[in-house]
Image (tube, rainbow, N blue to C red):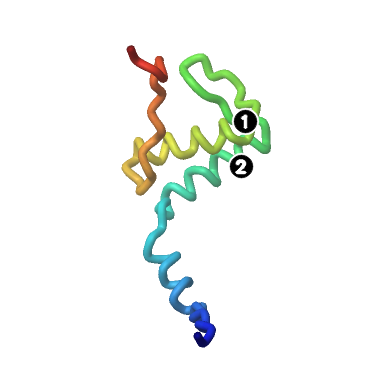
Amino acid sequence: MPAKKKAAKSKSTTKSKATSKRKYGKSAQAAVKKEMHAFKRGKAHSGKAKKKVTSRKQAIAIGLSKARKKGAKVPKAKSKSSSKSKK
């Protein structure tokens, strides 16, 4: 039996696929960028109590949350369930 050749993927196909299936919109990216800028300067705060943001992940989450409120293209946030196994 002859060995099968693997088809090489062209770069143009993967590039166009990446741009058409974008998870986050440009306004969402801008909101996260703005929040990260504030975090790096020590000006980022969260919640009603305006507690200081202490981690990079918190800053990203706040930026995405603000983008969602504005109506930007952002995937749904993962919902937290109180109990993992229900009996």
Q: Residue farthest to the bottom? A: 2
Q: In x, y percent, where is residue 29?
A: 48, 50
Mark 1 crowdedness (10 Å alpha carbons): few <14, some 14-19, many ≥20: few
> Which residue occupies the extreme front position in the image?
1
Q: Is residue 58 left or right of residue 14?
A: right
Q: Please tell me whether residue 5 is drawn above or below residue 23 in the rendered image.
A: below
Q: Amino acid at mark 2?
A: His
* Relative image position of residue 11 (x, y in whole percent): 51, 78
Would you place residue 32 above or below residue 49 in this image? Answer: below
Compared with 14, 47 (above or below) is above
Amino acid on which disc 1 is placed: Lys
Q: Nearer the viewer, residue 10 or 22?
A: 10
Q: Secondary structure at mark 1?
A: loop
Q: Which residue corresponds to mark 2?
A: 37
Residue 80, picture quadrant: top left
Q: For mark 2, give the secondary structure.
A: helix
The residue most toward the top is: 87
Residue nearest the viewer, comparing 18 with 51: 18
Residue occupying the point 43% across, 55% down: 26
Residue 4, percent from left and from top? 50, 82
Depicted 65 relative to depicted 72: above or below: above
Tell which circle, 1 or 2, labels the residue nearer the N-terminal end.
Answer: 2
Identity of the residue drawn at 41% across and 58% down: 22
**Residue beneath disc 1:** 43
Q: What residue is rendered at 52% in x and 79% in y? A: 6
Q: As rendered, which of 83 and 49 lies closer to the eye? A: 83
The residue positioned 67% from the left and 31% from the top of the image is 42
Label 2 neighbourhood size at 10 Å, few (<14), some (14-19), many (20+)?
some
On residue 64, the disc is none
x and y, in percent, of residue 12 in the image: 47, 79
* Image quadrant in which the C terminus is located: top left
Q: CA distance from mark 1 to mark 2?
A: 9 Å
